[in-house]
């Protein structure tokens, strides 16, 4: 369901878009961005893999063979996640792995209870314990694969080694992973790596798959190559990328991506019994260790563009949609006219941000960036684009780089009260521009060198809802006396412009919403993936151009992207994390390297006509915004069932 990434791996300007589904907080299997060498290798096998997908997947006639049940026990889920080329290889880079896999067909080890950094709901992992640098995971004793074989520690270990081929974030944290008997796995953390970060990368980034299918690719030579590569990468990443171990991993990934299983062998509560380009059909699997708690016998998982999802809900075809839902105001009004229809807007999923080119005048001036913060009517922008009733996005109360729920976890009320909320105020904007040497004549602003103050607002042409918001910004700046132009640019060119620093003011989407505030700052526009980029295909490019050496409150003069990279790998929850969160929040609020203008919400639509759902006050809605996990855990807790 969309592009995902490992926790604490760098983001990119275009990893997520507003009109594509995003899995908040990494609740499906995730992989970090591949290195340039691995990307090149995988590009060579795209055509062959796509062709194979057409023959390896069940057709609509296969779906008819699945068990059928009474209509009131069939849950129809609408998902804005169409799939056109798909297969059953979770390590394929060009084929869509079935969106219903995570949670329904395959179980994660545990699910994070957002916005807590160290609270998880057990799933495949029944329990876990910490002893020094070792994290022991104890698997559900009765967990079984859908081919009848037990789920064992080997399945988890093999998955971890195959995930290493895609540079999974967990391998930045550990030195070793071993089986301890048939049902326990032990991970040894690197010295200095907080265990809470190991758990976040493991539970948010690893989905175990069966060794009966994938174990043959985990050879002793592969394990040796992975161990050798990551050992060297911790001290000399450049040399590691040229090593024989890396070449071995590259070759292994190339071969792995060519594999096309005929079926999915899961361990979750549902089996895939049919799949087309528009629908996945799931039937309850009685071999699931908690099958007695699963009361929904069948799930039809629809994959459509967003307007079709809205139509499915309004027509009564779909009973539920979450994970990514966008209902414009007019659709919200129609949906809520039905007495059985409900819509929750759970804020804090991630942010939309306005970025300023900090390397070029006039936006290398703090006063000019602050003036723009006052001159942009963020609330009006959000209300026009996403409505006022059950909105999809709201303006943040304080632009400090965090969604409100995370900020309230790590910052005190007094700290938040001391920050600048930057309300829409053209008088304050004018005063700041005058302090920066600008002058207004005849209602128009002129730069200190006497030239008209002209601004180009750049936007990805595919982000239609954000375009609506930026039209408000464009009009407001013109009215204020700044000659503004809104330019929409195709996605690839847009990403290139931002990485190259070839822009004035632009939109950034989407980061934020992690329960780790340091991760939010590290993945923000001022982090190393987007600001003086250090790794990946854009390494060495300026990007945002903020700093990089800046006087950070409480830290002194530091290299911002490098310091964030260091902190996000070394600091666990506790007093130090709160201290650092306060430092970075002050920096973002005072110097405005970027400006939050929208905190996006997860809209969750559900109908009570056929099903019982949790009360709207239930923490299930707010902690598990992935629709698959919500439906499974809701049944396990007895809060979701057919009427």
Image: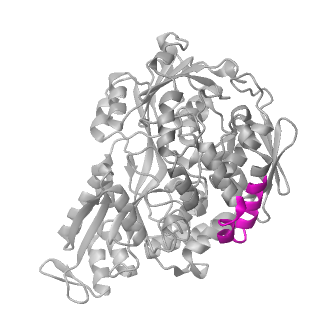
Residue 378 in magenta stretch: no
Q: How many marks?
A: 0
Residue 481 position by quadrant: bottom left
Residue 111 position by quadrant: top right
| 357 horizontally vs 450: left or right | right
Above or below, 347 against 578 in this view is above
Given the current orientation, which residue lies at the most extreme bottom position?
A: 449
Residue in view at x 85 percent, y 35 percent:
182
Image spot of residue 336 (x, y percent): 34, 30
Front-most of residues 352 and 607? 352
Front-most of residues 193 and 590? 193
| 14 horizontally vs 185: left or right | left
Front-most of residues 479 and 257? 257
| 543 horizontally vs 30: left or right | left
Image spot of residue 609 (x, y percent): 43, 19
Above or below, 120 against 370 in this view is above
Residue in view at x 62 percent, y 52 percent:
166
Residue 193 seen anywhere in this rendered image of the structure: no
Front-most of residues 421 and 624? 624
Image spot of residue 493 (x, y percent): 34, 61
Residue in view at x 35 percent, y 69 percent:
373
| 43 horizontally vs 570: left or right | left
The magenta-colored residue range is 224-245
Residue 179 position by quadrant: top right
Residue 398 seen anywhere in this rendered image of the structure: yes
Residue 242 in magenta stretch: yes
Image spot of residue 365 (x, y percent): 38, 82
Specify the principal SS of the magenta part: helix
Color style of the picture: one colour
Above or below, 384 against 51 in this view is below
């Amino acid at each position: 369901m969309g592009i995902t990434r490992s926790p604490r791996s760098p983001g990119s300007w275009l990893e997520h878009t507003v009109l594509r589904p995003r899995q908040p907080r990494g609740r499906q299997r995730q992989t970090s961005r591949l290195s340039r060498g691995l990307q090149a290798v995988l590009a060579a096998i795209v055509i062959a893999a796509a062709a194979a997908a057409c023959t390896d997947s069940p057709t609509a006639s296969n779906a008819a063979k699945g068990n059928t049940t009474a209509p009131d026990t069939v849950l129809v889920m609408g998902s804005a996640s169409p799939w056109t080329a798909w297969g059953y290889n979770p390590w394929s880079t060009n084929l869509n792995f079935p969106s219903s896999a995570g949670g329904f067909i395959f179980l994660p080890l545990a699910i994070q209870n957002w916005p807590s950094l160290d609270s998880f709901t057990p799933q495949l992992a029944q329990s876990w314990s910490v002893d020094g640098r070792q994290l022991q995971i104890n698997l559900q004793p009765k967990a079984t694969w859908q081919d009848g074989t037990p789920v064992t520690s080997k399945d988890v270990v093999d998955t971890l080694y195959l995930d290493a081929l895609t540079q999974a974030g967990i391998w930045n944290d550990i030195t070793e992973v071993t089986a301890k008997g048939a049902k326990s796995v032990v991970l040894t953390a690197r010295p200095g790596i907080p265990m809470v970060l190991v758990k976040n990368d493991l539970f948010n980034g690893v989905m175990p798959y069966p060794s009966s299918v994938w174990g043959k690719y985990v050879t002793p030579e592969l394990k040796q190559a992975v161990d050798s590569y990551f050992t060297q990468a911790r001290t000399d990443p450049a040399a590691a990328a040229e090593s024989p171990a890396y070449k071995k991993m590259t070759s292994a990934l190339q071969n792995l991506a060519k594999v096309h299983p005929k079926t999915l062998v899961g361990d979750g509560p549902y089996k895939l019994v049919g799949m087309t380009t528009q629908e996945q059909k799931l039937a309850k699997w009685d071999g699931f260790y908690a099958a007695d708690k699963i009361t929904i016998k069948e799930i039809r998982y629809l994959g459509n563009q967003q307007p079709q999802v809205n139509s499915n809900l309004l027509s009564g075809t779909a009973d539920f949609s979450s994970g990514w839902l966008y209902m414009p105001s007019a659709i919200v009004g129609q949906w809520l006219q039905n007495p059985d229809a409900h819509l929750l807007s759970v804020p804090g999923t991630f942010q939309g941000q306005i970025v300023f080119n900090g390397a070029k005048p006039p936006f290398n001036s703090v006063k000019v960036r602050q003036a723009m913060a006052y001159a942009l009517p963020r609330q009006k922008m959000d209300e026009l684009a996403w409505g006022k009733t059950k909105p999809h996005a709201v303006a943040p109360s304080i632009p400090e780089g965090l969604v409100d729920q995370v900020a309230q976890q790590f910052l005190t009320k007094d700290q938040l009260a001391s920050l600048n909320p930057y309300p829409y105020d053209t008088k304050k904007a004018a005063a700041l521009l005058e302090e920066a040497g600008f002058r207004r004549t005849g209602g128009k602003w002129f730069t200190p060198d006497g030239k008209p103050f002209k601004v180009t607002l750049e936007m990805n042409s595919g982000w239609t809802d954000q375009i609506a918001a930026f039209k408000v910004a464009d009009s407001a700046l013109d009215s204020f006396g700044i000659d503004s132009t809104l330019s929409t640019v195709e996605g690839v060119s847009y990403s290139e412009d931002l990485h190259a620093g070839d822009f004035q003011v632009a939109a950034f989407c989407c980061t934020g919403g992690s329960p780790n505030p340091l991760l939010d700052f590290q993945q923000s526009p001022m982090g190393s993936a987007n600001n003086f980029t250090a790794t990946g295909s854009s390494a060495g490019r300026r990007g945002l151009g903020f700093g990089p050496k800046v006087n950070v409150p409480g830290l002194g003069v530091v290299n911002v992207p490098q310091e964030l990279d260091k902190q996000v790998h070394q600091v666990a929850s506790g007093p130090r994390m709160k201290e650092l969160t306060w430092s970075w929040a002050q920096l973002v609020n005072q110097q405005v390297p970027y400006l939050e203008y929208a905190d996006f919400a997860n809209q969750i639509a559900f109908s009570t006509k056929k099903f019982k759902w949790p009360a709207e006050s239930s923490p299930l809605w707010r902690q598990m915004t992935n629709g698959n996990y919500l439906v499974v855990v809701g049944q396990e807790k007895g809060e979701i069932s057919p009427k």
